[in-house]
Image: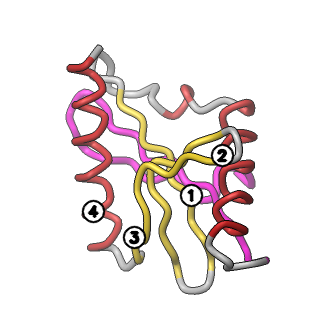
Amino acid sequence: MPGSRRLGSDDEDRVADWLAERGLTVVTRRYRGGGGELDIVAFDGEVLVCVEVKRRSHVQDGAEEAVSAKKLARMARAANHYLHATGLGERPVRYDVVAIGANGVPRHHVDVTNA
């Protein structure tokens, strides 16, 4: 698994840069706390954006479906932990997914909990 873990880390690095190019302010990567983890934590204005990066190298589509309701609940716990641990208090939180298919092109799904 070290190879796939390394690939995931490389994907997260590329996606963080890609999001920054699109105007988000990336503040943390690979955050763990509150029983969950966040691949990327960024700000879009005043909104805290928690990003899950998913790759499925063997198919063009489908990475998005790998983010379940259970995964989103773990992300929400991690986001609450992050807000309290950093002293940011209450603020709007958004959950995004960036899916990378076989072609390597990222697909950004914004606010997946309200889709």
The first of marks 1 and 4 along the sequence is: 4
Mark 1 vs 2: CB contact within 8 A: yes
* Mark 2 surroundings within 10 Å by alpha-carbon count, few (fewer than 14), some (14 through 19), many (20 or more): many
The first of marks 1 and 2 along the sequence is: 1
Which residue does the numbered mark 2 point to in the structure image?
75
- In 3D space, how far apart are the residues under numbered discs 1 and 3 (Cα atoms)? 10 Å
What secondary structure is marked by label 2? helix
Task: Report the residue at 75% width, 78% height from top.
Answer: 89
- In 3D space, how far apart are the residues under numbered discs 2 and 3 (Cα atoms)? 17 Å
The first of marks 2 and 4 along the sequence is: 4
Which residue does the numbered mark 3 point to in the structure image?
26
In this view, which residue lies farthest toward the bottom? 45
At label 3, the amino acid type is Val
At label 4, the amino acid type is Trp
Q: Position of residue 46 (x, y in %)?
A: 61, 85
Q: Which mark is residue 74?
A: none
At label 1, the amino acid type is Cys
Q: Position of residue 33 (x, y in %)?
A: 62, 48
Task: Report the residue at 75% width, 40% height from top.
Answer: 73
Which residue does the numbered mark 4 point to in the structure image?
18
The first of marks 1 and 3 along the sequence is: 3
Can you say whether 93 is above or below 24 in the image? above
Mark 2 vs 4: CB contact within 8 A: no
